[in-house]
Image: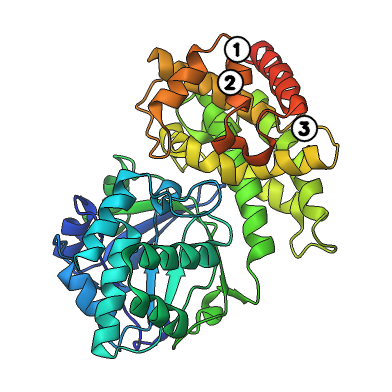
């Protein structure tokens, strides 16, 4: 927008937990950073991003973010958290048994912001309400389906737990939470990106990042106040984001996990190595072709996306050798990703009495991945905010690990323990052993 001459909009960026190593470097550069994009054909492009007008220093009381969020000049509050950072249980409600949630309920009851997205936004919106800041849009940018509606329910539940009916009324009357779908692979910056940027542009930027050239952003056009004309710069503004996010979550995110888990078993370090291994690519391709696409096509006809073409585009993107996206990053948070990315396809196929032979390869790969974590033989540290280590250890120590995995309700929802699920995952485990000896 700013490159087209529209200077009415600017971003203020901050984090709610502290400890960011990026924020100080960005602040020193006035919010500007270099973006390197790499196409599957290996074409490198460099662009200076200047849309961030303010880097908000982190303080425990979040004073800077609260002041900006409370202002009438701020019509949109956007946020990105990890899958596990929403702290939802299997019924899409806040899991009040979690230490972080319980602590933030207590903090909010005492008028403090806490460290979760709920505690932070409760503090911001309280201040906005008190200041007469008016209507505001709360915009999720993450990998979860129906993210806006689900987040709104959880935020209102948080208000109820705190006992703040006035804030709940303000949220109901003065905010909207449109769902969105964001798709662009952006790995952790590799050590060489700074030097590549310097060689190509002469700019030495410690905050330089790499991403693929592909990008897609779909947003439901349900804003409580003003918004930029994003549709003029390629954003898809739609009435419902559901079919777009469902395709992305199941096809891209699901097969991304499949590559990372199985690729790690095969001894690879990077997603592009996984995608160039015919054995690993075949697992992802068959999962999408045999099970995911039929499930999606059953929801509406015609589907607004050419699903086979989208599948091929996704798998080609994964093979991009210029994007050094590590298996460690993609494999993380399996206990949070599996229920949203993979389990829905298993449930729908089982409900329809259809084969899950291809989809069953994913839980089989994840189990073998977990078993390596348990033995301490993974080539990296596995991070999983949603995993209870005792539960995972119990699965791995079981005399029947496949049966124990399939009995986990958190991972599989209402089909946990389903006889056909257990049989299919057991057979997939045998096929995986033969495929990746």
Q: Is residue 400 left or right of residue 397?
A: right
Q: Which residue is mark 2?
A: 404
Question: Residue 137: x percent and y percent?
Answer: 43, 78
Q: In the rendered image, which quarter contains the C terminus?
A: top right
Tell me the distance, in whole angstroms, between the alpha carbons under discs 2 and 1: 6 Å
**Numbered marks: total:** 3
- Residue 292 versus residue 86: which sits nearer the camera? 86
Does label 3 or label 2 sit earlier along the sequence? 3
Q: Is residue 263 above or below residue 103?
A: above
- Using the rendered view, name the quadrant where residue 134 is placed: bottom left
Residue at 72% across, 36% down = 287
Question: Residue 310: x percent and y percent?
Answer: 70, 53
- Which label lies toward us, 3 or 2? 2
Q: Is residue 199 visible?
A: no
Residue at 81% across, 54% down = 297
Q: Is residue 13 left or right of residue 250?
A: left
Element carrying mark 3: loop
Q: Is residue 61 visible?
A: yes
Residues at discs 2 and 1 in contact (Cβ within 8 Å): yes
Crowding at dot 2, Cα within 10 Å, few <14 / some 14-19 / many 20+, comes out as many
Q: In the rendered image, which quarter contains the N terminus?
A: bottom left
Tell me the distance, in whole angstroms, between the alpha carbons under discs 3 and 2: 18 Å
Q: Which residue is mark 1?
A: 400
- Residue 360 versus residue 31: which sits nearer the camera? 360
Residues at discs 3 and 2 in contact (Cβ within 8 Å): no
Q: Which residue is mark 3?
A: 356
- Using the rendered view, name the quadrant where residue 238 is placed: bottom right
Question: Residue 228: x percent and y percent?
Answer: 45, 83
Residue at 72% across, 41% down = 347
């Amino acid at each position: 927008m700013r490159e087209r001459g529209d200077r009415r909009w600017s971003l203020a960026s901050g984090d709610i937990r502290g400890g960011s190593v990026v924020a100080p470097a960005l602040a020193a550069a006035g919010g500007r950073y270099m973006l390197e994009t790499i196409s599957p054909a290996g074409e490198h492009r460099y662009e200076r991003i200047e849309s961030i007008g303010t880097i908000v220093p982190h303080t425990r009381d979040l004073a800077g973010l609260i002041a900006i969020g409370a202002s009438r000049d701020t019509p949109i509050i956007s946020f990105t958290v990890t899958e596990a950072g929403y702290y939802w249980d299997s019924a899409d409600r806040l899991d009040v048994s979690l230490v972080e949630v319980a602590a933030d309920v207590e903090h909010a009851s005492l008028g403090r912001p806490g460290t979760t997205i709920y505690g932070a936004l409760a503090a911001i919106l309280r201040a906005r309400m008190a200041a007469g800041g008016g209507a505001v849009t709360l915009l999720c940018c993450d990998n979860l389906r129906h993210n806006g509606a689900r987040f709104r329910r959880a935020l209102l539940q948080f208000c109820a737990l705190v006992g703040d009916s006035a804030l709940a009324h303000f949220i109901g009357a003065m905010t909207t939470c449109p769902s969105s779908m964001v798709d662009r692979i952006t790995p952790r910056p590799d050590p060489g990106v700074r030097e590549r940027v310097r060689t190509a542009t002469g700019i030495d930027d410690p905050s330089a990042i790499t991403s693929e050239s592909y990008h897609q952003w779909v947003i439901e056009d349900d804003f409580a106040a003003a918004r930029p004309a994003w549709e003029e710069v390629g954003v898809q503004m739609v009435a419902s984001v559901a079919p777009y996010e469902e395709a992305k979550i199941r096809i891209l995110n699901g097969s991304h996990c499949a590559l990372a888990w199985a690729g790690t078993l095969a001894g690879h370090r990077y997603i592009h190595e996984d995608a160039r291994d015919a054995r690993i690519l075949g697992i992802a391709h068959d999962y999408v072709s045999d099970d995911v696409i039929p499930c999606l096509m059953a929801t509406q006809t015609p589907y607004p996306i050419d699903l086979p073409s989208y599948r091929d585009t996704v798998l080609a993107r994964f093979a991009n050798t210029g994007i050094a996206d590590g298996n460690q990053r993609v494999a993380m948070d399996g206990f949070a990703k599996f229920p949203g990315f993979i389990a829905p396809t298993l449930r729908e196929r089982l409900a329809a009495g259809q084969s899950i032979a291809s989809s069953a390869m994913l839980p089989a790969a994840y189990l073998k991945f977990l078993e390596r974590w348990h033995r301490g033989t993974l080539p990296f540290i596995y991070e999983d905010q949603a995993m209870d280590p005792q539960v995972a250890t119990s699965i791995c120590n079981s005399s029947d690990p496949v049966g124990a995995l399939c009995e986990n309700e958190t991972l599989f929802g209402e089909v946990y323990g389903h006889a056909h699920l257990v049989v299919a995952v057991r057979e997939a485990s045998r096929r995986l052993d033969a495929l990746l000896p």
